[in-house]
Amino acid sequence: MQKDNHRLMLEKVFKEHEYQEDALLEILHRAQEIYGFLDRDLLMDISGSLNLPPSKVFGVATFYSFFKLRKPGQHVVTSCLGTACYVRGAEEIVQAVEKEFKVKRGGSTPDGKLSVFATRCIGACAMAPTIVVDDEVIPKATKEVVIKKIKEVLGGAESESV
């Protein structure tokens, strides 16, 4: 039933944009807002509705790191790995998060509560390293601050690491 409702919402988006192929990026954004992620079936649906080759739709969806092609966890951590963030320690923060919560970047914990993603740049270079936890930007992040924030959003649950 919810899938039907989602499809009706997406159909409204198509109509708002008059099924124009030049609205692909906006339609992908709206589709992700509606569904939470863009799986293969949804991208094929968008391709057919806009009369675009699947390669074009998949190409745009995979080019921009904002789009999620798999269902993300309940809580999402995104690390900027652009040059400024990288040289200021973002990679070490991601590794600490992976170790602490037993999750690999691009994946989710087995219980589906946490996903970790990396992106090339979020446009906050002056605040590097920058980590985003559930849409909250953590400027000048440290391993300790990020891990503490993740534990807070997970409900204060302690990790299983020793």
Image (cartoon, rainbow, N blue to C red):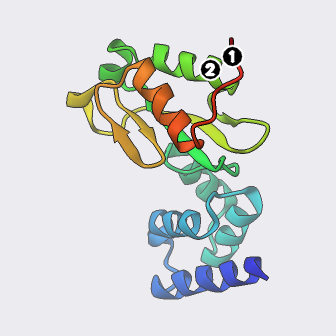
Give the amino acid at mark 2: Glu
Residue at the location (27% across, 36% down)?
A: 124
Q: Relative to residue 41, is residue 58 drawn left or right?
A: left
Residue at the location (74% across, 79% down)?
A: 2
Q: Which quadrant of the view contains residue 56? A: bottom right
Residue 113, given in percent of the width and then of the height, sits at 68, 44
Residue 113 vs residue 7, the one in the foreground: 113
Residue 79, given in percent of the width and then of the height, sits at 46, 31
- As displayed, is residue 67 above or below residue 18? above
Residue 97, given in percent of the width and then of the height, sits at 56, 23
Q: Residues within 10 Å of mark 2 (few under 14, many from 20)?
A: some
Residue at the location (79% across, 83% down)?
A: 1
Residue 142, given in percent of the width and then of the height, sits at 38, 20
Q: Relative to residue 4, is residue 60 drawn left or right?
A: left
Give the amino acid at mark 1: Ser
Task: Give the number of the disc on residue 58.
Answer: none
On-image quarter of the C terminus: top right
SS for callout 1: loop
Residue 141 vs residue 53, the one in the foreground: 141
- As displayed, is residue 97 above or below residue 113? above
Mark 2 / mark 1, whichever is N-terminal:
2
- As displayed, is residue 27 above or below residue 146? below
SS for callout 2: helix
Q: Residues within 10 Å of mark 1 (few under 14, many from 20)?
A: few
Q: Are marks 2 and 1 in contact (CB under 8 Å)?
A: yes
Total marks in image: 2
Task: Give the number of the disc on residue 100.
Answer: 2
Between label 2 and label 1, give the one nearer the viewer: 1
Residue at the location (55% across, 87% down)?
A: 12
Q: Which residue is mark 1?
A: 161
Distance in Å between CA atoms under marks 2 and 1: 6 Å
